[in-house]
Every structure is written in C-alpha cells, then in structure tokens.
Image: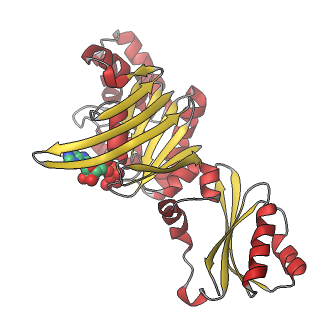
Amino acid sequence: MIKINNLSKIYTKGKNEVAALKDINLQVAKGDIYGIIGLSGAGKSSLIRCINRLEEPTTGDIYVNGINIVTLKDKELRSARKKMSMIFQNFNLLNSKTVFENIAFPLRLIKIPEQKIQEKATELLKLVELNDKSNSYPSQLSGGQKQRVGIARALASEPDVLLCDEATSALDPKTTHQILSLLKNINKQLGLTIVIITHEMDVIKEICNRVAILGGGYVLEKGNTIDIFSKPGNKTTKHFIEDQQKIPEKMLSGNILNLSFTDGSANIPIISKITREFNVDVNIVSGKIEYIQEKQIGKLTIQIDTDRHKLLDIIDYLNKNHVKAEVINHG
Ligand SMILES: Nc1ncnc2c1ncn2[C@@H]1O[C@H](COP(=O)(O)OP(=O)(O)OP(=O)(O)O)[C@@H](O)[C@H]1O
Ligand SMILES: [Mg+2]
C-alpha cells in the first residue's frame, strides 16, 4: 500500500540545515493501522507530510498503491492526493461554514453534482454520528465533535489512506478513546488504511496493529505492536513503554527482573515453578496486565535472591517458557 524507500528530509534555511529524516524505510500494508511514535522533534510530522508531499522529500521514494509519488507532477499529484486524506491535531475546519458545508467542501472543489454531494455528506454525517449537528458551526462543537467533522471531511473523497497527525492530542482521554474507536470502525468497515502519528503509547496500544518508533530522524524499531510491546529492543521504545511502570528507588536492590508474558505464556504459573525448580524465594515488586488490541500482555517485576550462576539458569528457563526476562538490577 505504502512503501517508503531510503527517505530523507533536510530543511534548509540560509546556511542552516536540519536533517529531520534519515534513511527511512517503512512498509504499510493495505488495511493496516500503522502507528508512528516518537518524542517531540523526532521527525513524525515531517514523515507523514512527505507521504502526501506537503513536504518535499530530499531523497528517496514513496510508493502509494504502486505509484512513486515523489516523481509526480502537479496534476498527477493532485489526483494521487485525493486518495490520501489527512486529519490534524487542531482540526483545520472552516469556521465560517456549517458542519455540513465543511464535509461537502472537498466535493464542491472537485465539482461533484449537488444531488451526490447531499447524499454523500448525509451518509458521512451518519457515519460519524453528527446528524443532529449538520447546521451547527465549528465554534458550537466540542473537540471530539470537531474531530468527527474532520474525519467525515477526510472521508468525502473516498481515500485509500487516512493520515492522522496527532489527531487526538488535543482531546481528553475519554474523547480520545471515542475517536480511536471511530477510526477503528472505519478501518474495518471501509478497509481504509490508516497511518497515525502520535507521542502517546496508549494510542498505539489501542488501535495500531503495527508500529514504528522514530528517534532523531531514524526508524529505531518497527514491527507488530504486540511484539514491540512484549520485547522492546531499543532504549527509546523502552522509555515509551516503561515510563508508566517506574520502580521506586528503594526497591531497586538485589536481582531485579522485568518479565513479559504474551498470550502463549500468560497462563503458566511461572513464579511458583521457578521457586520450586530452583529453590529460590521470589518477591513480586510490581505487576500489571495490559491489553493490546484485545491481546493480553503481562508485565511483572520480580526480585530474586540468588547467585549469578543460578540467575542465568533462571533466565534461560524463563525464555524457554516464552517469558521474556530482562535484568534491570544485579545484586
Ligand atoms: N519547516 C521547517 N524548517 C526547518 N526545520 C524544521 C521544519 N519543520 C520541522 N523542522 C525540524 O525538523 C525536526 C523534526 O520536526 P518534526 O516537526 O517532523 O518533529 P515531530 O516529531 O513532528 O515533533 P512534534 O512531536 O513536536 O510535533 C525538528 O528538529 C524540527 O525543528
Ligand atoms: Mg509533529
């Protein structure tokens, strides 16, 4: 669906150069909800804006539906863009137009017959559950409702891809959840491919089947969300995942292990097994179960009082039982 090859983006202003994207390689399959996460300045917006060429890539190729959009001229680019819609953090609605007219706007631009516009806009209002707000103005809507209008307007041109740049960052958690559910429904119902840029891991966890972690303009890690969550390989990824489960300093003594269990291993009574097999005491420091798109991942932090040799055997045993173990403190 989208194939990004060796993409780089350098912003030049006078003598100053900022390398925002460096040798990016990504593939988004049809029907994916692909998340791109990174800290501020990581290059997320630059990347998504290169996909529809709101920014000109410096080098590299971007294939959308097999067409290299980097080489397209004005007219072809305009028609390729119709298949790629975008929604924004600040909604970008036309404040002087009603909800209905905001949704109808892209259709008027391409001179769709009035009858069709009425039909399409009505259908979209229904899809985003805003039938009763048709004649309201954006200033009369809540943030979540404004983003629903943004989504309906984005869908008017029947795109293949929806690009979302921090689409829920201005919304509270409950409204975020509602908008994400709507996006997931649209993805399922219309088979729409969605690319989501965010700095919130919760967004990724809730709806993205694949994720790329961006840092300093590079793709640091990419893969299935569930794999990345259960076995983060990179420091920045860990920062996003583990931020929420900080261990109090005073508990950081002895051998401390972070364990992650996925669906396959979540039901094994692994702690009692270690205790028995290795004749050690195990303290549970913290634990939680997370759900990533209906799949379960258990996170457990344990403390084991034992020597280094036995510790390595225990780690080996855990890995054999599909529990990923990582030592975060040696004692
Ligand atoms: N138009 C521009 N001119 C010059 N430098 C830019 C421009 N846009 C972005 N940059 C720089 O490129 C780098 C990446 O910026 P980008 O906006 O892509 O990051 P981001 O991950 O979207 O950050 P945020 O989470 O804050 O939105 C930053 O160092 C930024 O200062
Ligand atoms: Mg940004």
Tell me if I can see residue 49 in this picture.
Answer: yes
What's the residue at 31%, 26% (across, down)? 101
Residue 147's x, y, as percent?
A: 39, 42
Residue 116 location, quadrant: top left
The scheme the figure's colours follow is secondary structure
Q: Which of 186 and 37 is in front in this view?
A: 37
Q: Can residue 141 be seen in this view?
A: no
Q: Is the residue 12 above or below the residue 174 in the image?
A: above
Residue 190 x %, y %:
56, 26
Placement of 157 over or under 97, stated as above or below: above
Q: Residue at horizontal 32%, vertical 55%? A: 41
Q: Of all residues shown, which one is farthest toward the front? A: 309
Total numbered labels placed on residues in the image? 0
Query: Is residue 171 found left or right of 212 in the rendered image?
Result: left
**Closer to us: 35 or 25:** 25
243 and 312: which is toward the camera: 312
* 295 or 8: nearer the viewer: 8
Judge from the rendering whether residue 227 lies leftward or rightward of residue 39; answer left or right: right
Where's residue 331, x and y in %? 65, 88
- Left/right placement of residue 119 relative to residue 77 reads right
Furthest residue in direction right, as rendered: 276
Q: In this view, does 216 lie above or below 118?
A: below
